[in-house]
Image (tube, rainbow, N blue to C red):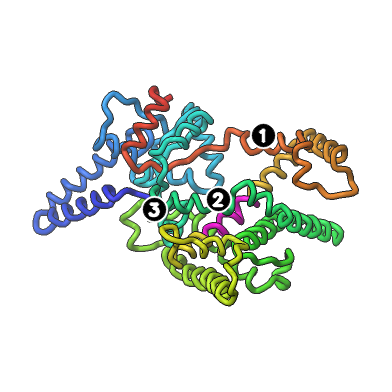
Amino acid sequence: MATPDDCGSWLLYLSLAAKCGGDQPYRLAGFLALCVVTCLLHWCFPGGPAWGRWWWTRRVSGAAAVPGPRGLPVIGSMWLMTGLAHRKLAAAAERLRARRLMAFSVGETRMVVAAHPDVAREILNSPDFADRPVKESAYGLLFHRAIGFAPHGAYWRALRRVASTHLFSPWQVAASGAQRAVIARQMVAAVRDMSAAGRGVEVRRVLRRGSLHNVMWSVFGRRYNLELDPAKESPETRELRSLVDEGYDLLGVLNWSDHLPWLALFDLQGTRARCDRLVPRVNRFVGGIIDEHRARNGLSSAPPVVVDFTDVLLSLQGDDRLADSDMIAVLWEMVFRGTDTVAVLIEWVLARLVLHPDVQARVHEELDRVVGRDRAVTESDSASLVSAVCGVSRIKTAGRDHMLLLGVSQQRYYRVLLHILPDAA
């Protein structure tokens, strides 16, 4: 998203243009010519207009420029973020020989791509990158009050502490092993039934439904049978799936207003209107589940029993206690991010195994030897499944197309990049 300084500069340009008009059109023509020359000067800088504009206004003495495509004046290289963006970025970095770090512009947003693991690791470990630029759709979908986009500070640390203690801790992961086993059996049964019926198996749909059921169980305490037929789904599952799908569509769209702030008033892509329609549905759905948990705990004379993450948030006391609006934002993000992240990772692992039959054969041989064909795989078997575990770990980290993409919105970020890569090569 463009910075406030960028938005203010456009207001300054518009006010100057208004003063240059009237009965002296030559002043307006001179002002327009100056704007064109300024845009071209910004565009000539490596990385495109956003980087050129930053460089001319906040020049870091003695620093080399990070290589990158110039794109077009004003819009920069916005097309790189459409379609198969990871392949376009990899091709651009290869063409410019930016093997470690590449800068480019998306409208008025400065972007950097780290294609080297050492560079990505140092960037991720730097506190200067703790805050993420909040997209208009992310803000509209309440994520600015959840872990993913909340500003780094006391509130974010409290949310992270609660999540790591009650949702992602080793004992909690181990305690939910039976839950994952149930969902895994349902997914295998669904694939087997589709294969037996002679229908093609849409793996992505099976993985997303299984992942959604797992998140609903952990976050809301809801347990349902996995159904691929929408007509057989429970109304609650169908509604939540609709909310998640709509949210992903909104976040996946390249929103012009995030990068060209002078378009924000027009909402040309309808992003703001769609968010305004989606958020009340999210509030009703998640808020209703919170009310049910609160009512259930209130009917019992015994201390509330913590069954799921909703109970955890309701049990917080003192400074850690959250308002209902913040609870809705946190739970909504847990469901939203937990559903697709796991499904995409498993789909990626399966796709890579299909492309490497030799690795797939080794995994099958190891499963037959360690587990056999008379029982299902359990999580305790992972210690003996060396090839399978190493293969998954390798798939998660391999590939040059896996790039760290960051929006750069503060001057100190660029100083970190120059420390990482002094020669900008």
Residue found at x 71% / y 57%: 179
Q: Which residue is under mark 1?
A: 394
**Residues at marks 3 and 1, CA–CA distance in whole angstroms:** 35 Å
Look at mark 3 in the image and give the residue it sits on: 258
Q: Nearer the viewer, residue 297 or 371?
A: 297
Secondary structure state at the residue bearing disc 2: helix
Whether residue 74 can be seen here: yes
Front disc: 3 or 1: 1
| Magenta segment, prevailing SS (helix, strand or loop) | helix
| Residue 141 in view | no
**Left/right of residue 320 with respect to residue 220 in the rendered view:** left
Magenta-drawn stretch contains 5:
no
Disc on the earlier residue, 3 or 2: 2
Three-letter residue code for mark 2: Thr
Residue sitting at x 58%, y 67%: 304
Q: Residue lying furthest right in this view?
A: 374
Which residue matches tag 2? 165
Q: Is residue 416 left or right of residue 248?
A: left
